[in-house]
Image (tube, rainbow, N blue to C red):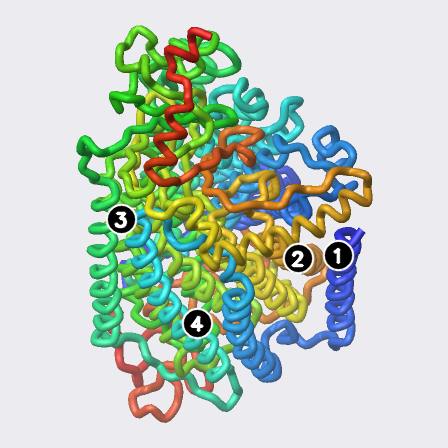
Amino acid sequence: MSAHAHDHVEDHHDDHGHHHKETFVTKYIFSQDHKMISKQYLITGLFMGIIGIAMSMLFRLQLAWPDKQFGIYEILLGKWGADGIMDPSVYLALVTIHGTIMVFFVLTAGLSGTFSNLLIPLQIGARDMASGFLNMISYWLFFLSSVIMVMSLFVEAGPASAGWTIYPPLSALPQAIPGSGAGMTLWLVSMAIFIASSLLGSLNYIVTVINLRTKGMSMTRLPLTIWAFFVTAIIGVVSFPVLLSAALLLIMDRSFGTSFFLSDIYVAGEVLHNQGGSPVLFEHLFWFLGHPEVYIVLLPALGITSEIIATNSRKPIFGYRAMVASILAIAFLSTIVWGHHMFISGMNPFLGSVFTFTTLLIAIPSAVKAFNYITTLWKGNLQLNPAMLFSIGLVSTFITGGLTGIILGDSALDINVHDTYFVVAHFHLVMGISALYGLFAGVYHWFPKMFEGRMLNKNLGYIHFWVTAIGAYGVFFPMHFIGMAGLPRRYYTNTAFPYFDDLANINVVITIFAFIAGAAQLVFLYNFISSMFFGKKGPKNPWKSNTLEWTAEVKHIHGNWDGPIPHVHRWPYDYSKLNKDESDYVIPGEDFVPQTMPLQDNEEEMNH
Amino acid sequence: MTAFLVVLVIILFGVAIWQMGKIFQLSKGKSDTTSQIANDKDNNLHGWLSLMFVLFVYALAFYSHWKWSNVFLPQSASEHGVDIDQLWLISMVLIFVVGIITQWLLFYFSFKYRGKKTQRATFYADNDKLEFIWTIIPVIVLAGLIIYGLFTWTDIMNFDEDEDTMVIELYAYQFDWRARYGGNDNVLGEANVRLIEGANTLGVDTSDPNAQDDIIVNELHLPVGKKVLFKMRSQDVLHSAYMPHFRAQMNCVPGMITQFAFTPTITTEEMRLDPEVIGKVQRINEIRRANSEKLVANGDEALEPYEFDYMLLCNKICGNNHYNMQMKIVVESEEEYNAWIKEQATLAEALKQ
């Protein structure tokens, strides 16, 4: 009893921020409240997403009809689209910035930033993040880096255009490509700030999960969302600093005459003084982040999906411990597979063998996850809400894209499809589309938590899902074929020489599907904005979910729970659990048992 | 114009679904708090749509194969490429079988267990045996693939160099290729970009005795059946020497020499008679004829008919003209090759001119 009372005192102590008077600035701009910060992340991420997707529409237009003129180029690209003809340099800039924005700004910050911030405190039963102030700084650094990235689009010589992987020497030499001038400088500055933001965020998530779990919330009672965010944050802390070091060394090479990545270069009619550096070193540093980055993007999406599939199947997630173990295994393996991006970079072929081995190992935990999702659906009572459909869609694209990974991870097979459209198709399905589905699933599911009970319109959600699903497969399935025909990626046009002429109609098909899928995002955008203000208010716990966030106040208050923090008595997946004599659910008439519910008399305890 | 129409149709399509959504929204009554949560009607509809969706995915896969498998690369023109193609086929069959089954289960379950008010989900949280099975099966299958793949990879990358191996340097720069043959001694002279001067555009060390008989060309000729060791060099930025028909690729890295070796097995002439290649060339020429008609109508010159040739492509983003950085490769009989190489000027001769 005394322990209990003590907790209450602590709870109250956490509560002190509650009574401060909030001004417009502290509430909406420099907010330290995790719910507001999560919305800031989401909206900034969506805004960047609009730019990123719009860019992909432009270059798809170019790829489908390279010899036609489109006035839209001149309108949007100015001098690089004069007379409706896209300039090759701006084509490369578009693919570069599209990649950068989608990977980092949308799928890292927009996905992980949004949902880690929203859900970690709410689902573990904390009043806020461990440090609200660092959390605020983290968002504003992200905002600053977004602003700089967008600014770089307006530089005279054009934005960075050496590909999102910015391999030097191309990214180091303005003589080699105009985008490697001021555009690349801004890119690097923006990314350095982004990394700082990501690190502050990740450290905060880790500390919060470890220290601020409510009473009874043991690690094995955490929802899989939290496990995913927690492990993602750890991978981020391990690998993002390495990208920072790569960026700093590249800045040195570019501006201070060092030779970390440059050696023996003759460009624009003169020999550079640089000697002894190696571009392969950059590749190692870049992919040491770059590959874990795939899982930084994907794991939160998988975590979100685990939660949504279980809730909407009205069944416990199948194999909770195996799911946690898979997350940990994927996280560990993800940090030792980076070399599979470099099989033909000139590194020692023996290293290639090692990386093939580790890479194919990662298929095992991934397969376990996929099978567990499918088994969770089995004999469920599926509530096919838009969030559920996006989660099922995620499992589908995760499987399809993951399977082609078995081909690309095999060094011998990679030789001939490396850097072709086969790779583009693979990673868009497995991390791009899958993670986007995870993002959408999360938005549909937790919208009521973000916007004080308002819900997204479900019919618009259904249209959004089906059109996107058809569009995504329509874009990326045929894309494997042009890759298998040997078509290299990042070609401004495939018709400069005749060999690929017969791929033109496949490119048209891909582009049409891309526009259809793009149009579906407008439906989402409309739904998002209108529901934010006029969405119907749903019940407090609309999806009849077990997790703690639905016990928090619908109205956003600083501290989340008006009274004491709820205590947890069970794991979060007691859906459709029957009582001892199997006559009814544990709580008669209700097919779910919230985590706050103590063990009932007529109930057998689970091992969690 | 058609492009414009397509864009217009797409935009109108977007507007149409937008409006449809609005109508849906307006037709829904007010007040009900559960109106945005899936009910049995939604579950039924979207369960069925799930089933139709997996059929759509199958249809798309089937259609793509039926319609587009003719764009694939023809049979491998190199010795090791046959092994790669074999491994590729096995992996592809495997992933197709797994993909077809798992996608079916996923969407069929979405359909079969679509929610109903009267239905009760089965509380089923764990089954160690089941999980063990689907951990161990991928382990075994992947172990097989890994071992097979690693043997193939090691065979390709760890070639033994003997006297018969021909050494050729592939030299990449923005935005073209050069090939340097070792000449009579089959040894390449030393080279470094710092030595680039005037006609010596590859920076070959002209004082090196091995360099005197080097031959620099911008069309790669290879004798059939002879092992070639390529030494790759780059002048400025990363490039990648991609020879898709030979299943060969290696990056060209400034500051270091990378290498890749293969034995071409099919001459250009023979490849032109390959039925797949004939079909591909025919289709490309039909497209070119159609394009020519348009060009001629505009008063431009018609396009020349296309004839198949092997090629070396740049496959690492290297600058604005990356998309058009290629070199023709000719595989021919030993005699033809010898006749051709005799015609070419050695470095010493070229520099004297």
Q: CA distance from mark 1 to mark 4?
A: 32 Å
How packed mark 4 is, by other alpha carbons closer than 10 Å (few <14, some 14-19, many 20 or more), is many
Whether the residues at callouts 2 and 1 have beta carbons within 8 Å, the answer is yes
**Chain letter behind tag 4:** B
**Chain letter behind tag 3:** A
Q: Which mark is residue A356?
A: 3
How packed mark 2 is, by other alpha carbons closer than 10 Å (few <14, some 14-19, many 20 or more), is many
Image side of residue A198 versus residue B204, left or right = right
Q: Is residue A197 visible?
A: no
Q: Which residue is mark 2?
A: A512
Secondary structure of the residue carrying tag 3 is: helix
Q: CA distance from mark 3 to mark 2?
A: 36 Å
Secondary structure of the residue carrying tag 2 is: helix
Image side of residue B59 versus residue A581, left or right = right
Q: Please state the horizontal and vertical placement of residue A18, each as a whole percent of the image.
A: 52, 47
Task: Inspect the image, locate mark 2, and give the three-letter code of the amino acid beneath it.
Answer: Ile
How many numbered markers are drawn? Answer: 4
Nearest the eye: B143 or B349? B349
**Chain letter behind tag 1:** B
Residue at 39%, 72% in the rendered image = B102
How packed mark 3 is, by other alpha carbons closer than 10 Å (few <14, some 14-19, many 20 or more), is many
Is A34 drawn above or below residue A318 in the view shown? above
Q: Which residue is mark 4?
A: B103
Residue at 25%, 61% in the rendered image = B142
Q: CA distance from mark 2 to mark 1?
A: 8 Å
Q: CA distance from mark 1 to mark 3?
A: 43 Å
Looking at the rendered image, the disc whose residue lies closer to the viewer, 4 or 2, is 2
Whether the residues at callouts 1 and 4 have beta carbons within 8 Å, the answer is no
Q: Which residue is mark 1?
A: B6
Q: Which mark is residue A219?
A: none
Secondary structure of the residue carrying tag 4 is: helix
Q: Please state the horizontal and vertical placement of residue A542, each as a whole percent of the image.
A: 55, 71
